[in-house]
Image (cartoon, helix red, strand yellow):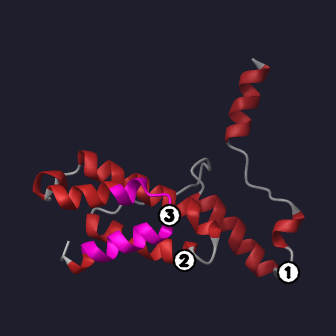
Amino acid sequence: MMAHLFEVCHFFVMWCPSQDTFEGLDSGAAFVACRWHELFDQYSPDSYHAKLYSLSGLISEAVEIAELQKNQDAWGKHLILVKAEIDERVKTGIESQFCSARHLGMLNKISHSDTSSEIIRLGRVLDLEGF
């Protein structure tokens, strides 16, 4: 019973990073970082997980985040979530019935890509083609 209680409590623990994480930040920036993490962390009970219904909007967001990730690796966590949502939409969304095989292949590559440059390149091609 106690082990199960620990697992439940551990699941709902608030994020409490080391002091080194906030080195060089003022108290306002540290507060925003903590709230931002709490709001979007997938294990936080207060997390918000927005869903975009436009696949083209998801692609645009993935490209923007990939561009940000080139300078700051911290954006990688958010990019993973966006890529997972793109993958889910390709597999289950109505777009899969109307997209060409080429576009579906490009969407699949974006959702499984490990490099920001590939996501940016494919996203821009889709944008140019009016996807």
Quarter residue 63 falls in: bottom left
Percent position of residue 105, x then y: 25, 55
- Report the mark closest to the observer, 2 or 1: 2
- Tell me whether the residue at label 2 lies in contact with that at label 1, contact meaning CB atoms closer than 8 angstroms: no
On the question of residue 116 being in view, the answer is yes
Residue segment shown in magenta: 109-126
- Residue in view at x 74 percent, y 72 percent: 31
Give the Cα distance between marks 3 and 2: 12 Å
Q: Is residue 71 left or right of residue 66?
A: right
Q: Is residue 59 above or below residue 92?
A: below
Name which residue type carries label 3. Answer: Thr
**Position in image of residue 113 (x %, y %):** 44, 57
Query: Between tags 3 and 1, which lies in front?
Result: 3
Residue at point 41% right, 73% down? 120
Q: Quadrant of residue 1?
A: top right
Provide the secondary structure element on which disc 1 rests: loop
Distance Cα–Cα, label 2 vs label 1: 21 Å
The reply to whether callout 3 and callout 2 are in contact (CB within 8 Å) is: no
Label 2 element class? helix
Residue 121 lies, in percent from the top left, at 37, 73
Give the residue number, with chain letter if any, for mark 1: 24
Q: Which residue carries the number 3 mark?
A: 115
Amino acid carrying label 1: it is Gly
Q: Secondary structure at mark 3?
A: loop
First along the sequence among labels 2 and 1: 1
Identify which amino acid the numbered label 2 is placed on.
Answer: Leu
The residue carrying mark 2 is 68
Callout count: 3
Label at residue 57: none
**Residue 8 to residue 37: above or below:** above
Residue neighbourhood size for the residue with mark 3, other residues' Cα within 10 Å, grouped as few (<14), some (14–19), many (≥20):
few
